[in-house]
Image: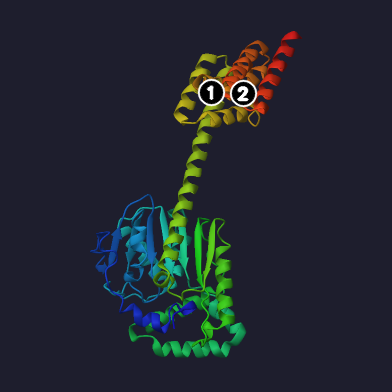
Amino acid sequence: MSRPFSRTYAAAALMCAFAMMPAVASAASEQADGVNVGAYHVDAVSAGSGSYTVIFESGFASDLSVWRRVAPEIAKSAKVFVYSRAGIGKSDARPEARTPQRSAAEFEQVIEAAHLSPPFILVGHSYGGYLIRLFAQRHPEQVAGMVFVDASMERFDTELKKIDAAKVAQDQKYLDTLTPAPLKAESKLVDEAFAAASLLPAPKLPDVPAVVLTSTMVREQPEFFMHTVPAVAVWRSLHEQLFTQFSSGSHVVTANSGHNIHLEEPALVAGAIQQVIASATEKEQRRVRKLAQEKLLGTLDRAGALLQSKRDGEAGQLVASALKESGYGENEINGLGYTMLGKRKQPQVAALVMKFNADTFPASANAHDSYGELLLELKQPLQAKAQFQQAIALGTAGGKSPQAMEGYRGNLAKAEKALAQ
């Protein structure tokens, strides 16, 4: 059995967890000595470098080695961190009851002990998918993206019981006989926590780029009710509901692997992580650009105040300095000028912006034409005429389209008409 669902593990997964102990990505590893949380040692490996730290949270009873087919690929372009929870693999056991809340709290302690800095991309398989949700709920500002690898859903048992409660109970009884003794207490605590959580609204997650990976593998002779077609449909539906919390990302369904997608289709998981990193990078770039634009617009507003105080020279210097610092290109400056003219209703500031553009890009017909339009708006037809004439000359020399040339000539005609009045 390979799918844990709400109980977070299957018989095969439990037995395999103790067999898969090789080091993760030894060739790419920067640190393989783990970290200490108080008096307890936590087996951990970090590798790679980048703007984001990708933290892997394993499924129930699984140690860090289960990420050996994914983490090395991600470490080529990002910092990765994998670890084994308390009592798993080479990590010391701890005396506290192994509730999900305790594991989530220890997750936070490990991050602090390892001196990991956000932004984080969280990757969670099975039960680990539930734990990264708890972390993201507590620390939304630290999370830049999330990847759920066939993540456990606390409402799964509740929904299955609506279909056939007797078969769900039969599954549970059989699973209990397969659970290794050291894990029985934790398994019971997780089941109880999931049962309680299923009655509550799902934890609110930050709206970050996310990928939800779902296994829908069909088994010819399902060993458990949870592997039957109706149960798999419920599993998929719960994952679809999980994905609705995010406005950016994708829900990827695969029938080519079972519960351990990261072992059976590692390229699929690696691709999902890379997709989230790329989306998070784009989102951050948009945020930075927006802040820079808001700062620039604020500076231009100050220039407007200077103009109202008849301090034209200072206003011009302020606009020129701000635009140079912005690193904007010709088209961006041109758009900014029209923003000042339209939305912000500051034509004099817009004219300063357009003048800077024409001076900075003297070979641009469009820059001169736009500056001319602003001068015409300010009732300066003679100066506007000179700009339109320059635009026509540059456009002719540069082979501008007939449509563009028609626009330049039309603007020149407007300036000449204004002069004739």
Query: At 61% across and 31% down in the image, what residue appears?
Result: 339
Q: Pinpoint residue 177: horizontal percent, then vertical percent.
A: 41, 90
Q: Pinpoint residue 287: horizontal percent, then vertical percent.
A: 50, 44
Type of amino acid under label 1: Asn
Query: At 41% across and 72% down in the image, what residue appears?
Result: 264
Mark toward the start of the polypeptide (2 vs 1): 1
Q: Pinpoint residue 195: horizontal percent, then vertical percent.
A: 52, 78
Q: Pinpoint residue 230: horizontal percent, then vertical percent.
A: 59, 81
Residue 349 in view here: no
Query: At 59% across and 87% down in the image, what residue appears?
Result: 164
Residue on which the image places disc 2: 370
Q: Identify the image quadrant of the C terminus.
A: top right
Residue on which the image places disc 1: 357
Q: Identify the image quadrant of the N terminus.
A: bottom left
196 up-or-down from 329: above or below: below
Q: Nearer the viewer, residue 152 or 358?
A: 358
- Name the image quarter holding residue 325: top left
Number of residues whose C-alpha sits closer than 10 Å to that of mark 1, classed few (under 14), some (14–19) or many (20 or more)? many
Q: Secondary structure at mark 2?
A: helix
Residue 370 in view here: yes
Number of residues whose C-alpha sits closer than 10 Å to that of mark 2, classed few (under 14), some (14–19) or many (20 or more)? many
Position of residue 69 in the picture relative to residue 401 (left or right): left
